[in-house]
Amino acid sequence: MNIQQLKYFCVLAQYEHYTKAAGELDIAQSSLSYAISSLEQELGVFLFEKQGRNVILTKQGKQYLYYAKKALDLLEQGSRIVKNSSAFSGNTLDIGFVSSVQSRVIQWIQTYQQSSGNSCRFIMHENGTKSLMRDLKNGTLDVVFSSEPENSGEYETRPLFRQEIIVLVPKNHPLAQQEYIAPDDLNEEAIIMHTEETGMRAIISNLLAFHEIAPLIAGEASEDRVIAQEVSIGLGIALMTDCPEIYPDNVRAIPLQSPLNFRSIYQTISKNHYMSKDLIQFLKHVEKDIHFSQ
């Protein structure tokens, strides 16, 4: 079946007369008859039955009409959404990112629009790496900036830059007086961890395991801002990427002495989804910015 057959079916159901329906559709009556007959053969049921000079829906026809109208309504709704979004600039880009790179993503968007004059609309989505990957896979997002995804072979990934991992502590915490923190200093400290949905959870867990530290988990959160707030009220300390713009005033970020004190940020796109011209140009802009900042 196709959209044209569904439209013909709905119009005939409305007029209950082949000649009137064909006139409304501006097609030959024979074309309408052929379309309806083909649809009935495909479905294996009769959709109409004769009643004098008219036709009326069969029981199966009435059932099918509900779904045909619903399908056409959804297609029309989708067309309106796409047209409305394209009326702005021709395209909309949905950008996914982890919280620690928000300021950098905003900078990329601003400089891209200023340098290119492109008025493409950007929609920003902040979440954990695993959630972002699910949205990328189902087509909700166009590109993601996050930790390296699990099963990275399913995507096209590219490392962009590293972020330093620091220890965030309240200013009144005993560790706050130190210039740096050694891994052994973390023993018996209550640590606020990232949730399993984030890429940081595996990174921090591997770091602690490397130094043979079993963390005392004081709580979990998916966003760095929330973790920083929890540190500020004394719920524990945290290992997180250095992101000064989100720190409350009463916390201190202290360097961590470890060969694993970094998190790599990756650019990830889907292998299976269409890349618009705007997306290609934006990613070239990101690549250029990374090149000059290194």
Image (tube, rainbow, N blue to C red):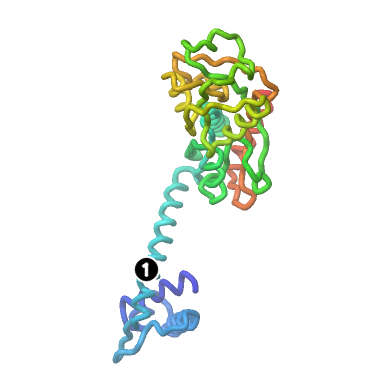
Residue 124 falls left or right of residue 159: left
Q: Is residue 110 visible?
A: no
Q: Is residue 205 visible?
A: yes
Residue located at (68% from left, 47% from top) = 153
Where residue 162 sits in the image (x, y, percent)? 65, 27
Q: Is residue 65 above or below residue 122?
A: below
Residue 48 falls left or right of residue 145: left
Q: Observer-nearest residue: 199 or 137?
A: 199
Residue bearing mark 1: 69
Instruction: Count neighbours of disc 1 (C-alpha within 10 A) and say few if under 14, some if 14 to 19, many if 20 or more.
Output: some
The amino acid type found where label 1 is placed reads Lys
Where residue 276 sits in the image (x, y, percent)? 58, 47
Q: Is residue 29 above or below residue 287?
A: below
Residue 63 falls left or right of residue 176: left
Q: Is residue 180 above or below residue 44?
A: above
Residue located at (44% from left, 13% from top) = 250
Q: How many marks?
A: 1
Where residue 44 sits in the image (x, y, percent)? 47, 83
Residue located at (44% from left, 18% from top) = 248
Q: Quadrant of the C terminus?
A: top right
Residue located at (55% from left, 42% from top) = 130
Q: Observer-nearest residue: 202 or 119?
A: 202
